[in-house]
Amino acid sequence: MIQGFKLTTDYVQFYDSVGSWEEAIQLAAKPLLIGGQIKQSYIDGMIESVKEHGPYIVIAPNIAIPHARPELGSVEIGYSVTLLQEPVSFTDDEENKARLLISLSCVDADRHLEMLQAIVMVLSDENKQEALFNAMNAEEVLEIFNT
């Protein structure tokens, strides 16, 4: 789906709930940190970006795409998918909750747009979106993103 990176089970996670949106971002980006696509400074940048600019990463009801500026510690392209049983709130507003977090590591502006377009294509398909929210294991998520 995204040229140069294939989603694997190592990049798909499930959690019942998290204590805060900051924890959600930390957990959602952890596979990218472990995989070497990002540095800890990139995760810190994701959190600071939301603090500074608000919940712009919540792109649709229950969907957030955490990311930061490449120079903050993006090493190579990649993304991870995290599903929460209980939504996490980015503000007090109901529309700023998310159950699906897709963390991006974008090395430059062109790749950033390319990755966002590819992910939005998946998420704009209502059947795929519903299947994602109902996924019970990593293999089901891989099926949605890798086909």
Image (cartoon, grey):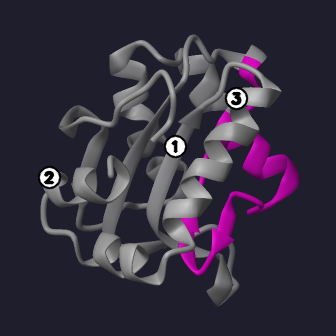
Q: Badge 2: few (under 14), some or many (20 or more) residues near its Cα, within 10 Å?
A: few
Q: Which residue is mark 2?
A: 139
Judging by the rendered image, the residue that carries numbered circle 1 is 103
Q: Which residue is mark 3?
A: 111
- Distance, label 2 to label 1, CA atoms, is 18 Å
> Secondary structure beneath disc 2?
helix
- Does 130 sit above or below residue 37? below
Residue 31, quarter of picture: top left
Q: Position of residue 1 (x, y in %)?
A: 45, 42
The amino acid type found where label 3 is placed reads Arg
Task: From the image, state whether disc 2 or disc 1 is nearer to you.
Answer: 2
Of callouts 2 and 1, which one flags the residue occurring earlier in the amino acid sequence?
Answer: 1
Is 108 one of the magenta-colored residues? no
| Mark 3 crowdedness (10 Å alpha carbons): few <14, some 14-19, many ≥20 | some
Secondary structure of the residue carrying numbered label 3: helix
Quadrant of residue 70 within the rendered picture? top right
N-terminal-most mark, 3 or 2 = 3
Measured in 3D between alpha carbons, the distance from the residue under mark 3 to the one under mark 1, in whole angstroms, is 14 Å
Tag 1: amino acid: Ser
In the rendering, at what x and y percent does residue 108 appear? 76, 21
What residue is at 77 percent from the left and 42 percent from the top? 49
Can see residue 63? yes
Q: Amino acid at mark 2?
A: Glu
Look at the image and give the residue range highlighted in magenta.
Answer: 46-70
